[in-house]
Amino acid sequence: MTCEELMAALLDYTGGELVVEHRETVEVHISGCERCESYVATYTHTTRLVRALPKCGALPPALEARLRKALEAELGEG
Ligand SMILES: [Zn+2]
């Protein structure tokens, strides 16, 4: 799994559980990639917060767009 694939897997998981297949590959990747490890921690935390809200099961599109942009900017720096 590349950093880009990890990011895509994370974005797939808005509003739902990360599928087990993805969870395992993500865990393998972050065990060797500190940068993605911190992304996953932040993303999981954010998603949990959003899911804790009464009427909101998914990240608002604006927030998802911001996260995606931030991740892509970071990854683009190589
Ligand atoms: Zn990575």
Image (spheres, helix red, strand yellow):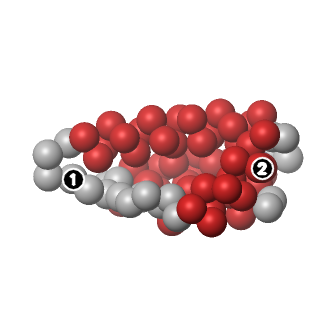
Q: Within 10 angstroms of label 1, few (less than 14), some, or many (20 or more) residues?
A: few
Q: Amino acid at mark 1?
A: Cys
Q: Is the residue 1 above or below the residue 38 in the image?
A: below
Q: CA distance from mark 1 to mark 2?
A: 29 Å
The residue drawn where x is 61% and y is 56% is: 23
Q: Is residue 8 visible?
A: no
Residue 59's image quarter? Answer: bottom left
Give the x, y percent position of residue 76: 77, 51
Left or right relative to 18: residue 37 = right
Give the x, y percent position of residue 71: 63, 48
Left or right relative to 70: residue 29 = right
Direction left: furthest residue: 54
Q: Secondary structure at mark 1?
A: loop
CB at mark 2 closer than 8 A to ligand 1?
yes
Q: Amino acid at mark 2?
A: His
The residue drawn where x is 45% and y is 35% is: 45
The residue drawn where x is 14% and y is 52% is: 55
Left or right relative to 67: residue 52 = left
Q: Nearer the viewer, residue 46 or 22?
A: 22
Residue at the disc numbered 2: 29
The residue drawn where x is 78% and y is 40% is: 31
Q: Is residue 10 visible?
A: yes
Residue 39's image quarter? Answer: top right
Left or right relative to 53: residue 3 = right
Residue at the disc numbered 1: 56
Of the residues under marks 1 and 2, which one precedes in the sequence? Answer: 2
Q: Nearer the viewer, residue 33 or 66?
A: 33
Q: Within 10 angstroms of label 2, few (less than 14), some, or many (20 or more) residues?
A: some
Look at discs 1 and 2 and give the one toward the viewer: 2
Give the x, y percent position of residue 73: 68, 48
Q: Secondary structure at mark 2?
A: helix
